[in-house]
């Protein structure tokens, strides 16, 4: 399965959320259509089967799950509410990526969560910014290659950071531009 498809079958957890696996308190760290990974302060019985319960944006989710390996469970039953939440999350993420490509950071935030940042562990979408006499142009890219006349960054970068990079590049000499590209390249490499 491609990373992009996997990305749209996950809830965008910016940070762990509390839940229950049977009688055990857990912290969900990743949740997909087929299972979840979580942390638990107590050892869980091998092959345990229990109801996984948690709240996502005021919606209660309950799904029967079974331990697959330490810290991971697979779902035994389908939970319609989870399917609906995953569809909503995928739609939000698509809108956020489009907003990022257009430089509209406000549409990338839900509550206190930056959607594309929450999904960056599976997303490999970049934005390439190129500068010419006509100004700046951006395009979505699947590779982090740095152009000769601009830079490439993660799609989830805040608008303020993009504006700073553009201003530094545009107002700088040849060496400043080279350093801006290098900074963008190092930033992308540190997150891959």
Image (cartoon, grey):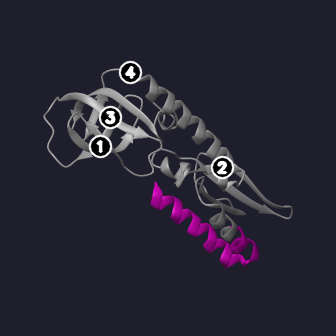
Residue that badge 2 annotates? 107
27 sits left or right of 165 in the view: left
Residue that badge 4 annotates? 78
Residue 51, x across and y down, in percent: 27, 29
Q: Do the residues labelled 1 and 2 touch (CB within 8 Å)?
A: no
- For label 4, the crowd category at 10 Å Cα-Cα, with few meaning under 14, some 14 to 19 and many 20 or more, is some
Q: Which residue occupies the extreme top position in the image?
A: 77
Residue 190, x across and y down, in percent: 46, 61
Nearer to us: label 3 or label 2:
3
Among numbered discs 3 and 1, the one appearing first in the sequence: 1
Residue at x-position 28% and y-position 33%: 73
Residue at x-position 61% and y-position 61%: 158
Element at label 4? loop
Q: Which residue occupies the extreme right position in the image?
A: 134
Q: Please report the bounds of the magenta region as a residue range.
A: 166-192
User: Is residue 70 in sight in this rendering?
Assistant: no
């Amino acid at each position: 399965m491609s990373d992009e498809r996997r990305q749209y079958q996950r809830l965008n957890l910016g940070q762990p959320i509390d839940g229950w696996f049977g009688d055990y308190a857990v912290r969900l760290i990743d949740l997909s259509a087929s299972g979840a990974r979580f942390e638990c302060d107590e050892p869980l019985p091998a092959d345990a089967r229990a109801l996984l319960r948690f709240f996502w944006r005021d919606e209660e989710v309950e799904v029967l799950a079974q331990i697959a390996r330490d810290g991971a469970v697979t779902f035994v039953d389908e939970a319609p509410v989870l399917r609906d939440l995953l569809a909503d999350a995928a739609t939000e993420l698509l809108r956020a990526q489009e907003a990022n490509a257009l430089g509209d950071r406000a549409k990338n935030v839900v509550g206190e969560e930056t959607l594309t940042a929450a999904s960056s562990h599976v997303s490999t979408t970049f934005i390439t910014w190129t500068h010419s006499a006509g100004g700046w142009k951006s395009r979505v890219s699947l590779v982090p290659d740095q152009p000769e006349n601009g830079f490439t960054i993660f799609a989830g970068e805040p608008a303020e950071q993009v504006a700073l990079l553009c201003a530094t590049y545009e107002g700088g000499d040849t060496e400043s531009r080279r350093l801006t590209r290098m900074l963008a390249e190092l930033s992308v490499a540190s997150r891959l």
